[in-house]
């Protein structure tokens, strides 16, 4: 037990928000509490964006404000500084999704290259992240994952993807900026895993700087992690692993059902939780040559990692141990861990309002779907509003 770690301390959790910001947060989460309102507003928003209706302003003052740092890297400066002041690293996350052409992929590579410079300049523990579909065409990743023969043009395209990735990982490694590569849908993940393992084998020789991501809602991932740790040890490199539960549960189950293959998902939430915690344990047991980032809003999993560090007498600030939450969610976890000097970060998404919509819709749906998440956020916000009144 760690009596000093109290995720219920709302004073620490919300001291970065003044009263009106706190009330605005309450408003956003109240809206998200009702699945009907979320579904309806998602439909209306997509319609308005399609027909170029002027709704950017209202989005910017509500859901975008809650979950994003700004429309550009510059606009995130204040949020980034606020996080740093409270001992939390901001991981600027360029959240433009669904733009698939070579010019956009190159532009994303260049933006992330600037993020590496930015992190190096401003962060105490610099971290950057990448979604592979930001620099690679989804259908090509799928074709590679299915081990289908590529045409000459596709081969050339894939070589360009490897080039973009290697450029970014090489730069991050050179500058000592930790680099997280996110996990996506299972039918493109084999290609992402292969590319990421290649980067880790190249750049993680001395220390884990490139991180892969595993989604523990998959029933095969614990075995994958175990094998990867053994393989890396044999080959003389270190594993960096962000552990998450996974963001595409419904989509995965629906696809498996439609196409008639067994779902790669766990049978239930308890199995996901069990494997999540087992993966955290496995990384901590191999802490000398494995680095772990617990990317989660689950209090029990965060507490487990903190307790394991305590039990094994591993320093809270050990360079192989990180906690991370998404901006706008679970401030009670982030800021209470930071107050006790754990390595904590927040993904801080940014991008033009209309291009961040896929990300924001995922957040809204996830918050509505994840049992109790919105309720928990609201309870904490209300408790803090009440505490300040007294
Ligand atoms: C810093 C950070 C980085 C992230 N990066 C990624 C990423 O790269 N890729 C990605 O996919 N997601 C990513 N996520 C999102 C993450 O996967 C989860 O969607 C989200 O964090 C909710 O899970 P949780 O552990 O926080 O909370 P919890 O509320 O404990 O768990 C909710 C999750 O449990 C799982 N679950 C729910 N019901 C069931 C069920 N019936 N059967 C099986 N499993 C179930 C689902 O994964 C669901 O999202 C990231 C999250 C964070 C905080």
Image: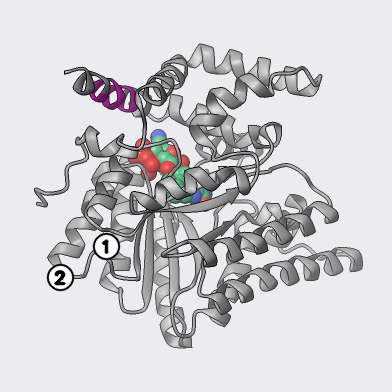
Q: Which residue is mark 2?
A: 313
Q: Residue at x 58, y 64 (%)?
A: 193
Could you tell whether 161 is left or right of 311 in the image?
A: right
- x, y percentage for residue 251? 58, 36
Pair 2/1: label in front: 2
x, y (%) of residue 370? 40, 30
Please report whichever mark, 2 or 1, sits nearer to the chain's N-terminal start.
1
Residue positioned 36% across, 32% down in the render: 17
Q: Quadrant of the C terminus?
A: top left
Q: Which residue is mark 1?
A: 281
Task: Evaluate whether residue 165 shows in this view.
Answer: yes
Where residue 276 appears, x then y in whole percent?
34, 52
Residue 368: x and y, percent? 45, 24
Magenta residue check for 73: no
Q: Answer with the quarter of the image where residue 136 lies.
A: bottom right
Q: Is residue 316 above or below residue 16?
A: below
Q: SS of the residue at dot 2? A: loop
Q: Is 73 left or right of 318, judged from the image as shown?
A: right
Q: Which residues are magenta?
A: 376-384
Q: Secondary structure at mark 1?
A: helix
Q: Is residue 265 in view?
A: no
Q: Residue at x 19, y 23 (%)?
A: 387
């Amino acid at each position: 037990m760690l009596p000093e770690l109290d995720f219920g301390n709302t004073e620490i959790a919300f001291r970065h928000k003044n009263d009106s910001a706190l009330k605005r947060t309450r408003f956003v989460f109240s809206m998200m509490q009702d699945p009907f309102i979320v579904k309806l507003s998602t439909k209306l928003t997509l319609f308005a964006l399609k027909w170029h209706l002027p709704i950017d302003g209202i989005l910017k003052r509500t859901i975008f404000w809650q979950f994003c740092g700004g429309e550009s890297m510059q606009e995130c400066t204040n949020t980034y500084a606020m996080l740093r002041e409270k001992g939390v690293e901001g991981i600027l996350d360029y959240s433009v999704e669904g733009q698939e052409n070579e010019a956009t992929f190159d532009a994303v590579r260049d933006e992330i290259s600037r993020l590496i410079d930015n992190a190096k300049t401003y962060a105490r523990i610099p971290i950057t992240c990448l979604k592979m579909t930001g620099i690679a065409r989804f259908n090509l990743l799928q074709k590679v994952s299915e081990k289908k023969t590529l045409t000459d043009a596709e081969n050339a395209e894939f070589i360009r993807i490897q080039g973009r990735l290697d450029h970014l990982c090489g730069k991050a490694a050179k500058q000592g900026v930790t680099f997280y590569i996110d996990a996506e849908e299972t039918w493109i993940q084999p290609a992402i895993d292969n590319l990421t393992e290649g980067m880790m084998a190249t750049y993680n020789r001395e220390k884990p700087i490139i991180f892969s991501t595993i989604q523990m809602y998959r029933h095969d991932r614990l075995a994958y992690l175990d094998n990867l740790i053994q393989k890396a040890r044999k080959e003389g490199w270190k594993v960096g692993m962000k552990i998450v539960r996974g963001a595409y549960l419904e989509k995965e189950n629906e696809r498996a059902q439609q196409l008639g293959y067994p779902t790669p998902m766990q049978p239930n939430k308890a199995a996901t939780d069990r494997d999540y915690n087992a993966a955290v344990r496995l990384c901590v047991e191999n802490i000398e040559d494995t680095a772990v980032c617990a990317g989660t809003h689950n209090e029990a999993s965060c507490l487990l990692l903190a307790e394991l560090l305590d039990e094994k007498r591993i320093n809270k600030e050990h360079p192989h141990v990180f906690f991370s939450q998404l901006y706008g969610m679970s401030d009670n976890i982030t800021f209470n861990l930071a107050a006790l000097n754990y390595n904590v970060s927040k993904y801080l998404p940014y991008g033009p309002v209309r291009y961040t919509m896929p990300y924001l819709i995922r957040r809204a749906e996830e918050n509505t779907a994840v049992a109790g998440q919105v309720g928990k956020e609201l309870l904490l916000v209300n408790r803090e509003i009440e505490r300040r009144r007294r």
